[in-house]
Image (spheres, helix red, strand yellow):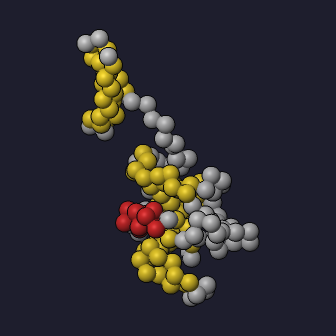
């Protein structure tokens, strides 16, 4: 009989396996995708993969989550930026539209709740749950890295 128990101990995920009465403790392997951003990034956006992550010291804390971003002519630019401000109830006067849970990081470009089926005018659309998580986690001054 084989018994498998998976636990996280002091941030190290391990698997304990019992085979014929002998226990072995092995490191758990993770199939989670690594974010393609620098360790300094608190938020990572991969434009080509249409995915975003939240990070702490290079370790993924949340994600990947699906995103949509800028349509042709309104592309979301790659680069490294800082969160400038947040507004849970932002209203875009440019586009006469709500932008719930906005986290601005490059002028008028923000992570916010939006359609995952429609490309934006440069912002990063997230599901409601993801937008709320990004809003709660990110603070002004946090680094956002956008990779092509």
Residue 3 percent coordinates (x, y) = 31, 23
Residue 57 percent coordinates (x, y) = 40, 48
Residue 54 percent coordinates (x, y) = 44, 55
Left or right of 49? Residue 43 is left
Q: Residue at x 47, y 81 (%)?
A: 90
Q: Quadrant of residue 74?
A: bottom right
| 45 and 66: which is toward the camera | 66
Residue 39 percent coordinates (x, y) = 46, 48
Q: Is residue 10 above or below residue 106?
A: above
Q: Residue at x 42, y 45 (%)?
A: 59
Q: Which residue is at the far front?
A: 1
Q: Is residue 94 above or below residue 70?
A: below
Q: Is residue 59 above or below residue 95?
A: above
Quadrant of image for the N terminus: top left
Q: Residue at x 61, y 56 (%)?
A: 50
Task: Please say whether residue 41 is visible from this viewpoint.
Answer: no
> How many labels, in total?
0
Left or right of 79? Residue 136 is left
Q: Residue at x 43, y 81 (%)?
A: 89
Left or right of 148? Residue 29 is left
Q: Quadrant of residue 14?
A: top left
Task: Please say whether residue 100 is visible from this viewpoint.
Answer: yes
| 118 and 56: which is toward the camera | 118
Q: Quadrant of residue 142?
A: bottom left
Quadrant of image for the C terminus: bottom right
């Amino acid at each position: 009989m084989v018994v498998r128990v998976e636990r996280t101990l002091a941030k190290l995920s391990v698997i304990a396996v019992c085979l014929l009465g002998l226990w072995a403790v092995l490191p758990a392997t993770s199939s989670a995708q690594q974010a393609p951003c620098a360790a300094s990034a608190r938020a990572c956006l991969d434009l080509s993969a249409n995915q975003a992550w939240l990070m702490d010291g290079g370790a993924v804390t949340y994600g990947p989550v699906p995103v949509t971003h800028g349509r042709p002519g309104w592309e979301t630019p790659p680069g490294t930026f800082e969160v400038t401000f947040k507004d849970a109830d932002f209203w875009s006067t440019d586009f006469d539209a709500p932008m719930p849970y906005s986290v601005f990081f490059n002028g008028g470009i923000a992570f916010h709740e939006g359609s995952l089926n429609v490309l934006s005018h440069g912002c990063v659309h997230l599901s409601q749950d993801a937008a709320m998580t990004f809003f709660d986690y990110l603070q002004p001054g946090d680094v956002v890295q956008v990779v092509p």
